[in-house]
Image: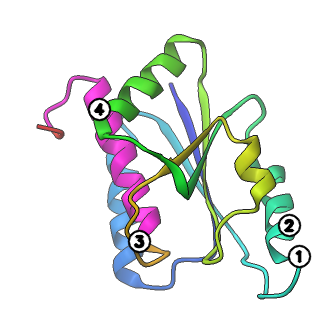
Amino acid sequence: MLQIRLICVGKLKERFYQEACREYEKRLSAFCRLEILQLDEEPDRPGALEKEADKIRAALLPGSFVIAMCIEGKEMSSEALAEKLGQLQTGGVSRICILIGSSRGLDEGVKREAGLRLSMSPMTFPHHLARVMVLEQIYRVLSILSGGKYHK
């Protein structure tokens, strides 16, 4: 079974975001082993992103394919992302780490090291909504790959 680790810098404080995440965690349990790691956000000082990057690197699953969520990343449709994940699985990838940086984003080095830089949209969204949106897309993509009806 596919193992997905969602590595997020910063904690969800709003109850409605927490509830939405729990709902997608429950739905995703049929498709993958999902783990969500919340790393502490560093205070806004010089070197903060580098410190967060060190924490992210330490949390990566060994041998995993890494997807960095960042605004300058590639925009993909749900179908295209499903195709990409399907190709990865066919190629033997069984572990995926998806990175969501702090409200300041991700360190450039972490983005360079990722196998895919992915953008949800050129629009700006609340930082914590990104986690819900990523979980929804993972669910949608895995539903597409399994031939489910959710996407239709």
Q: Which residue is mark 4?
A: 79
Mark 1 vs mark 3, CA separation in Å: 25 Å
Mark 1 vs mark 2, CA separation in Å: 5 Å
Q: What residue is at 35 percent from the left and 71 percent from the top?
A: 19
Magenta-span inclusion, residue 99: no
**Magenta stretch, main secondary structure class:** helix
Mark 4 vs mark 1, CA separation in Å: 37 Å
Q: Which residue is mark 1?
A: 47
Q: Nearer the viewer, residue 20 or 130?
A: 130
User: In the rendering, which numbered label is found on residue 129?
Assistant: 3
Relative to residue 95, is residue 17 drawn left or right?
A: left
Q: Quadrant of residue 100?
A: bottom right
Q: Position of residue 50 (x, y in %)?
A: 85, 66
Q: Position of residue 64 (x, y in %)?
A: 69, 32
Question: Pointer 1 and pointer 2: residues touching (CB < 8 Å)?
Answer: yes
Mark 2 vs mark 4, CA separation in Å: 34 Å
Amino acid type, label 2: Glu
User: In the rendering, which numbered label is found on residue 50?
Assistant: 2
Q: Write down the region rendered in magenta.
A: 129-149
Q: Provide the secondary structure element on which disc 4 rests.
A: helix
Q: Position of residue 92 (x, y in %)?
A: 60, 13
Mark 3 vs mark 2, CA separation in Å: 23 Å
Relative to residue 119, is residue 23 drawn left or right?
A: left
Location of the C terminus (image quadrant): top left
Q: Quadrant of residue 147?
A: top left
Amino acid type, label 4: Glu
